[in-house]
Image (tube, helix red, strand yellow):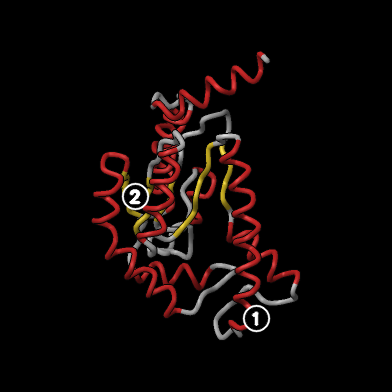
Amino acid sequence: MHPLQPDGKTAENDKMIREIPAQILPNPVECGSREHPADKAFENGLKKAGMTLDLRGADFTKVDPIRARAKKITNLNMDAYIGNRLGMIFDTTSANLSKVSAYRKNLESLGYECKMIYVNASLQNALARNNMRPRKLPAEIVQGDWEKAQKNMNDLRRIFGRDFVEVKNDDDLKTLETKATKLFSKLMTWTSKFPSNKPAQNWKQQELLKKKS
């Protein structure tokens, strides 16, 4: 879920932490996790349309339909992942509190376990990193999402409880790599365990019966 907190992406890319301030990491109910990469589909759409990734000053009457198609594609993929109870990683801004809360409630009703990794950066760094990215956003969008994410942080902490983890992302690269490595290790331990809740166990039993029949 993602324009930079909107930002902290570069150092943690390979460690499950991206630039976006928040991530929901449902525990896989089967082996493996799938990313929910709306941004990738969006960027591919921009490239196919021959448009620049630098959205500062862009004509959003042309950009928004491409974004809508990208969301449709990623939502279809998500439906397939959920049907097979595959673990998922959501990159997202935490600017939309109701959306994050709704995702969590729906997934937990199906047996998923969810964690939020809230990657927090200063507004100054968010704006600076936005200017370093291939797909640049207008500064007012970056600042607006950053302010909403900051405002929502306490509510997100309340919603996720002990499954809320905040990562400060204003450090140097070496420090960020150390943080990311420690967090990655903990998350891998968590995702390797099958959820013990009733919906997950019921789904598992149903799948075992299907294989026997």
Q: Residue furthest front?
A: 213
Residue 108 x %, y %: 41, 39
CA gap, disc 2 to disc 1? Answer: 35 Å
Residue 125's mark?
none
Does the CB distance between marks 2 and 1 fall below 8 Å? no
Residue 27 x %, y %: 46, 35
Q: In the picture shown, does residue 115 fall above or below 11?
A: above
Q: In the structure shown, which secondary structural element does the residue marked by tag 1 occupy? A: helix
- Amino acid type of the residue tagged 2 in the rendering: Val
Q: In the picture shown, does residue 102 fall above or below 190?
A: below
Image-based side of 106 in relation to 36, left or right: left
Tell me the residue that label 2 is attached to. 167
Q: Residue furthest top?
A: 212
Tell me the residue that label 1 is attached to. 62
The tally of labels here is: 2
* Residue in the image at 55% along x and 81% along y: 56
State which mark lies toward you, 2 or 1.
Answer: 1
* Residue in the image at 53% along x and 42% along y: 88
Q: In the picture shown, does residue 81 fall above or below 61?
A: above
- Amino acid type of the residue tagged 1 in the rendering: Lys
In the image shown, does 5 or 94 lie closer to the viewer? 94
Residue 126 x %, y %: 41, 67
In the image shown, does 143 or 27 lie closer to the viewer? 27
Quadrant assignment, res 55: bottom right
Residue 194 x %, y %: 46, 24
* Residue in the image at 49% along x and 79% along y: 138
Q: Earlier in the sequence, mark 2 or mark 1?
A: 1
